[in-house]
Image (spheres, rainbow, N blue to C red):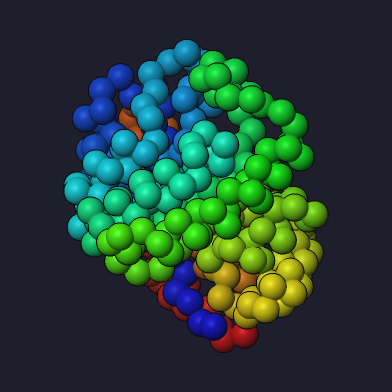
Amino acid sequence: MARPVRIGVQIQPQHAPSYALIRDAVLQAEDAGVDIIFNWDHFYPLSGDPDGAHFECWTMLGAWAEQTERVQFGALVTGGGYRNPDLLADMARTVDHISDGRLILGIGAGWFEKDYEQYGYKFGTAGSRLNLLGDYLPRIVERLRVLNPAPTHHIPILIGGGGEKKTLPLVGKYGDIWHSFSDLETYGRKSGLLADYATGARRDPSEIEHSTTWPGIDEAPAYVEAGVTLFTIGISGPDYDLGQVRQALNWRDQFATEIPEV
């Protein structure tokens, strides 16, 4: 399946003392030509002042649904254990309608211990959090199936992570987009494993788009050759500098409009 190479930006909702700074960054990113705008689902900053300014993920996505006109958007990624999965599906369906079908439902197992402890969630272990994600994904899919009104279309599910025994099988069964955090060599090996899991789930592996963090202009072509078609650049407040994003967009437009068919 041939796909165009796409550039996303993760507008990290940290260190912005005013939401207006985030709103402006979203507007500038859409005007610049990005394909997708992500935030993240944390309750505290991940860098800098650990108790610095921060805003919540899903209420923000509802605002983005109204503010934006063209881009897809979503969380990179929703913490799987932070919300009842049926409620999360309903939230996603509602934001999908508000945006006329532009939401990506990004989800992962969660990992930032402070989020859990400060907001009263059980942190558990990496294994227990992945098991919970495995329990939640079929509930999300089923709830999306029975909601009235139904979603405007099939809401793409992005799953972040690279665990070979638990995460990749979930991507193979439920994911429309796989976001990897691996270096190129590791990515290639895990990509092969994902293809096997997808085939085992009676899916065409080419149905799953491959995504990763922007590696820079020099390394990006090798990732495209290996199968990645979505790159995301993270920017943080309060400045939300889009300089690197604009460089990536220029690269996309000049050198990487489409990957070869596989």
Task: Name the residue: 31% across, 36% down.
Answer: 59
Where is 88 relative to 183, above or below?
A: above
Task: Name the residue: 57% across, 86% down.
Answer: 261
Task: Name the residue: 38% across, 18% down.
Answer: 53
- The answer to whether residue 116 of the structure is visible from this angle is yes
Left or right for 122, reference 230: right
Question: What x and y, as percent, mark residue 133?
Answer: 63, 46
Where is 149 relative to 201, above or below?
A: above
Left or right for 194, reference 243: right
Task: Name the residue: 26% across, 23% down.
Answer: 18
Residue most extreme to the bottom: 261
Question: What x and y, as percent, mark residue 217?
Answer: 53, 58
What is the number of callouts on the image?
Answer: 0
Q: Quadrant of the N terminus?
A: bottom right
Residue 15 vs residue 39, the one in the foreground:
39
- The answer to whether residue 212 of the structure is visible from this angle is no
Residue 192 vs residue 245, the one in the foreground:
192
Q: Quadrant of the C terminus?
A: bottom right
Q: Quadrant of residue 192?
A: bottom right
Where is 171 relative to 65, above or below?
A: below
Question: What x and y, as percent, mark residue 167?
Answer: 70, 53
Left or right for 191, reference 27: right
Question: What x and y, as percent, mark residue 250?
Answer: 38, 62
